[in-house]
Amino acid sequence: MAFRYVVKKRMVGIGTKTEKYVAASYSVANIDFDRLCDQVTSQGMVPRGIVKAVLDGMIDALCTYASIGATVRLGDFGSLRPGLNGKSQEDAKSVTADVVYRQKLIFVPGQRLKNMMKQSGITRLVTGSEIVPDNEENPGGNESGGGGNDGDQGENPLG
């Protein structure tokens, strides 16, 4: 198994924009809730209805704890903690709830998922065109836009 990336052209810089190429992560599929429940069912002896009920209950519990601002630790799966983004202010008195523009949940993978990531390779996804335009949709989901490689300069999209 490997994480996949495509090469994307980006314009970077303030004022004078410079054309650069980056490795952008590429999700090869979207796995919906029903398919995930089916996969968990196939891994053990638990009926699909029970798997779905447990996951639904866990989502309800996560909503409850997230709404009070708690960090939830989920063993090898990882943890979820509340986070937010706000605009910086000149003085402490000006920092109010009004300057917060985004609430979010931050997922930190647990040890088992971290180990999986360490053992996974990184593979360049070849498309019909060598460069994937920014406006081309990623059918598998989110794209981080981040870069990086596994140290193999042969796969380095920047040369």
Image (cartoon, rainbow, N blue to C red):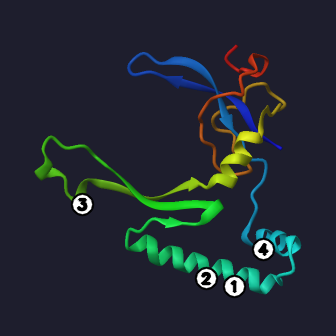
From the image, tell me which residue sits under label 3.
97
Three-letter amino acid code at disc 1?
Ala
Disc 4 residue crowd, few under 14, some 14–19, many 20+, Cα 10 Å: some
Q: Position of residue 154 (x, y in %)?
A: 79, 17
Q: Is residue 12 left or right of residue 118?
A: left
Q: Which mark is residue 53?
A: 1
Q: Position of residue 30 (x, y in %)?
A: 75, 57
Three-letter amino acid code at disc 2?
Gly
Q: Are marks 1 and 2 in contact (CB under 8 Å)?
A: yes
Tell us which disc is closer to us: 3 or 4: 4
User: Height in image: 11 above or below 31?
Assistant: above
Which element carries disc 3, helix, strand or loop?
helix
Q: Between disc 3 and disc 4, whose residue precedes?
A: 4
Residue at position x 65%, y 60% from top? 76
Disc 3 residue crowd, few under 14, some 14–19, many 20+, Cα 10 Å: few
Q: Are marks 4 and 1 in contact (CB under 8 Å)?
A: no
Q: Between disc 4 and disc 1, whose residue precedes?
A: 4
- Label 4 to label 1, Cα distance in Å? 10 Å
- Label 3 to label 4, Cα distance in Å? 39 Å
Residue at position x 49%, y 75% from top? 63
Q: Are marks 3 and 2 in contact (CB under 8 Å)?
A: no
Foreground pick, 64 / 85: 64
Disc 1 residue crowd, few under 14, some 14–19, many 20+, Cα 10 Å: few
Q: Position of residue 99 (x, y in %)?
A: 25, 53
From the image, tell me which residue sits under label 4.
37
Can you tell which quarter of the image residue 7 is in? top right
Tell us which disc is closer to us: 3 or 2: 2
From the image, tell me which residue sits under label 2.
57
Three-letter amino acid code at disc 3?
Ala
Residue at position x 67%, y 77% from top? 55
